[in-house]
Amino acid sequence: MEISNDQELTAQLALNRVPGVGPLAFSNLLQCFDTASAVFGANRQQLLRVPDLTVEIVDLLVRGMDATNVEQDVLWLEQDPGHQVIYLSQADYPALLAQIHRPPPVLFLKGDASILHTAQLAMVGSRNPTSGGIENARAFARNLATTGLTITSGLAAGIDGAAHQGALDAKVSINGSDRKGRTIAVAATGLDRIYPSRHRDLAYEIAENGLLVSEFPVGTGPLRTNFPRRNRLISGLSLGTLVVEAALRSGSLITARYATEQGREVFAVPGSIHSPLSRGSHWLIQQGAKLVETAEDIAEEILPILPSRQDVNENQVDVEALVPELSKDEQVLLNAIAYDPVSMDGLLSRTGMLIDDLSTNLSRLELQGLIDNLPGGRYCRKDG
């Protein structure tokens, strides 16, 4: 019997829902039966011959597609034209992700699917960062998104959320019109759910201006085992991974490990030697991750490995755009800093700023590579 393309894609959605059928089992089944539809038409004896397939999985498969509740995915797809699915077997599956070991066979998308094919940088870090870590994440993401890079993260509390927001805060000029910076949020749940719930508004903004991605079917909750799988997608979609703040026991280090295994670049922002949230970043640097202080440090590594493409006018990273237009307070502060070192007290006197505002603007200028932080709490302009 000839099977329509729609029937086969629905069968792949159903196969993706069978508990225990991960990328390896999914691949083995398609190799043995050619189509997902044929898998559900096979008998028990045929299924038991498939390598690495447990009796429990066989029992579930022989129950048929109807037992998988695949109609949940079908209804979700029909709800909104922005709801889409991409299969590993299709030509528009993201090329970088397809290169990793056992890529996910199905990706659920909500938003602008074309963003999957832009140059991406993953940004991850602590769920309970310092205020400085939040500021650093937003500044790095904003500066890098301004150049055209897409910022990819996991929608988690802390650094992830700050990275997404920083990218959305960026303004990118394309053909005379401005748009927000691009960001991709990779979820550890089905895309009908938002986790954590505090990021509901952020997720809606990403869906409107970027893209939400998940390998998990509709209805999947935030299971502990799903988060490492999500981290693998974050690094797999990206040319490199930047760790902003991370403890030694951190999911961010898992993402960095995946990036290394996938042959991608790993970057880390250093921090205080006294902070437990810097130890993971410092360990990564000891293991060979590139220490970064400014967005240019990342650009000089990413630019040479960007894939060539025809549409460079929109997607090409412009290193000269890494220093965005300064805010009024940043410009006032930069004017107050000469090439001779000046103390915090001196800057407070010259600018009239409050101490918190001064510290924030100093961090921004330092991230943009415009000033140096010297021993003894003094600052000066960088050469050039």
Image (cartoon, helix red, strand yellow):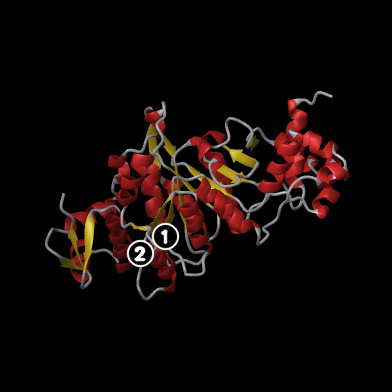
Q: What element carries label 1?
A: loop
**Could you tell me the amino acid type at mark 1?**
Val
Q: Distance between the residues labelled 1 and 2?
A: 8 Å
Cβ–Cβ below 8 Å for labels 1 and 2? no
Which residue sits furthest bottom? Answer: 274
Which residue sits furthest left? Answer: 340
**Could you tell me the amino acid type at mark 2?**
Pro
| Mark 1 neighbour class, 10 Å CA radius: few under 14, some 14 to 19, many 20 or more | many
Question: In the image, residue 244 lies at what x, y percent?
Answer: 42, 60
Question: In the image, residue 170 lies at what x, y percent?
Answer: 40, 44
Q: Is residue 176 visible?
A: yes
Q: Label 2: which residue?
A: 270
Instruction: Say whether disc 1 or disc 2 marks the residue closer to the N-terminus.
Output: 1
Q: Is residue 380 left or right of residue 98?
A: left
Of residues 169 and 45, the one drawn nearer to the viewer in this rendering: 45
> Which quadrant holds residue 110?
top right
